[in-house]
Amino acid sequence: MRAVVVGGGLGGVAAAVALRVVGWEVVVLERAAEFGEVGAGVGVMPNALRALRALGLEDAVRAIGTPRVSSGVRDRRGRPLFRVDAAEAEHVVAVHRADLHRVLRSALPARCLVTDTEVASADDVDADLVVAADGIRSRLRAELFPGHPGPVYAGTTAWRSVTEARFPRDLELSQTLGPGTEFGVLPLGDGRVCWYAATVAPEGGREADELARVREVVGDWHDPIPALLAATPPETLLRHDIHELAAPLPAFVRGRVALLGDAAHAMTPYLGQGACMAFEDAVVLAAACARHTAVPSALAAYDRARRPRAQAIVRASRLAGRFGHRLRHPLAVAARDAAVRAIPTSVTLRGAERFLAWEPPALSPDR
Ligand SMILES: Cc1cc2nc3c(=O)[nH]c(=O)nc-3n(C[C@H](O)[C@H](O)[C@H](O)COP(=O)(O)OP(=O)(O)OC[C@H]3O[C@@H](n4cnc5c(N)ncnc54)[C@H](O)[C@@H]3O)c2cc1C
C-alpha cells in the first residue's frame, strides 16, 4: 500500500514515519525548497512523548530536550502560583523545532522526502491514501470542505526565539501570567533556552524593532526574563499572530484523504498541544491502517478516534487563553492568580491528565 503525505512539517513527517512502521510505502511532498522548521522551541508533552515512543524516537528526542527540572506558573513579579518538583510528575521536554524535525527525518530514507513540490489538489495525487498535513492554511482542507470558514485570528500575537547564550542546567521550565500577556521559558538540553511572549493585540501589527516591543511588554518582569531577552539576537526573533480553526470540521477524512495536524485541528498554543496532537494523529492513523485492510474502514476508525479528542483540546486551549493571559482587568487577574495559587498541585495535575494520560495504540507486536 502506498501513501502520499502532502506537507513535510512535524505532523507530515511523523505520519510518514508511522506509516512506514506498519509497512506502507510513503512519500512526503513538501512545497518548500528544503525540509526544516523555524528557529523556535516546541514543548513535547508526555502524551506526545508516548506517541514518539511508539515510533521508536522518544529517547532521541529526550536526549536533545529539557533535562529533568522543576516547572511552574508564576506571576510577573516571580511569585509562584503553581509549582511541580522535578520528581513529582512526568515532565515536558522542550526541543528546538529544527532538531525535532531532524530526529523525525532521520527515521526516513532520503527517497521518501521530496521537496519543491506543491500539491494543488488531492486529485493530482496517485496513492491509496493521501495524508493532508499541509498546515493551518491547508489547501486540501479548502478543497475537500469548501464550506468551512478556515482559520480565524485568536486575538493574540506571539514572539519566539532561542537564546544564543547557555543558561544554568537547573533553570525552571515556566510560564508567567501577567495582565494580557504570558511569557514562557523552555530550557533545551544544551543550555540554550527557548522563550515565547504572547500578548493580546490587534491582528497584523508589526514593529520596526520587535525586540524593543517585547522589552516594553515584559522587560521589567521577574528573572530570568530580562536576561533571556538580553541573550536573544534581534534577528532571530519570530513574530506570529495566533490563528485557530474555531469552527470544528465535520470530519477529518474525505474519500481516501486523511487530514492530520494543523490541517485538521489548528489550535491556539496555550496548552502546548498543537504538534503533540499531530504526533498522536500520526500513530493512530498508522495503527488504523495496520488493523483495517480497506482504506475507507481505516479512515473511518481514524476519524472516530481522533476528532472528538483533538476538537476537545482545541476548545480547552481556547479556554486556557481566555482565563489565562487574555485576562487584563486587575481584579480579574488578581482573582485568577488567587485561584491558581489556591488549587492544590495534585488537583491541577489530575485535571491535566485528561490530555496528558493518552496511550498510543500498538503499531506492531514489538512496539
Ligand atoms: C507561537 C506558537 C507556539 C507553539 N507552541 C507549541 C508547543 O509548545 N507544543 C506543541 O505541541 N505545539 C505548539 N505549537 C503548534 C505547532 O507548531 C503546530 O501545531 C505544528 O507545527 C503543526 O504541524 P503540521 O505539520 O500540522 O503543520 P505545519 O508545520 O504548518 O506544516 C505544513 C507543511 O506543509 C507544507 N505545505 C503547505 N501546503 C502545501 C502544499 N499544497 N503542497 C506541499 N506542501 C505544502 C508547508 O510548507 C509546511 O512545511 C505552537 C504554535 C505556535 C504558532
Image (cartoon, helix red, strand yellow):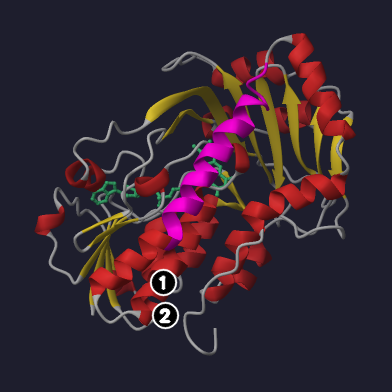
The dominant secondary structure in magenta is helix
Dot 1 falls on a residue whose secondary structure is helix
Q: What residue sits right under mark 1 in the picture? A: 17
Is residue 322 within the magenta segment? yes
Q: Position of residue 312 (x, y in %)?
A: 52, 45
- Crowding around mark 2 (Cα neighbors within 10 Å: few <14, some 14 to 19, many 20+) is many
Give the left or right position of residue 186, taking residue 152 as reference. Answer: right
Numbered mark located on residue 21 in the image: 2
Give the left or right position of residue 351, taking residue 43 as reference. Answer: right
Q: Nearer the viewer, residue 234 or 297?
A: 297
In the rendered view, would you say 361 is above or below 147?
below
Three-letter code, disc 1: Val
Give the left or right position of residue 135, taking residue 155 as reference. Answer: left
Q: Are marks 1 and 2 in contact (CB under 8 Å)?
A: yes
In the rendered view, would you say 248 is above or below 309?
above
Q: Residue at x 73, y 33 (%)?
A: 228
Q: Position of residue 177 (x, y in %)?
A: 74, 26
Cα distance in 3D space between marks 1 and 2: 6 Å
Dot 2 falls on a residue whose secondary structure is helix
Task: Report which quarter residue 237 is drawn in.
Answer: top right
Give the left or right position of residue 340, taking residue 146 as reference. Answer: right
Q: Residue at x 81, y 32 (%)?
A: 340
Quarter of the picture containing the N terminus is: bottom left
Q: Residue at x 55, y 67 (%)?
A: 51
Q: What stretch of residues is rendered in magenta?
A: 305-327
Numbered mark located on residue 287 in the image: none
Q: Residue at x 55, y 70 (%)?
A: 360
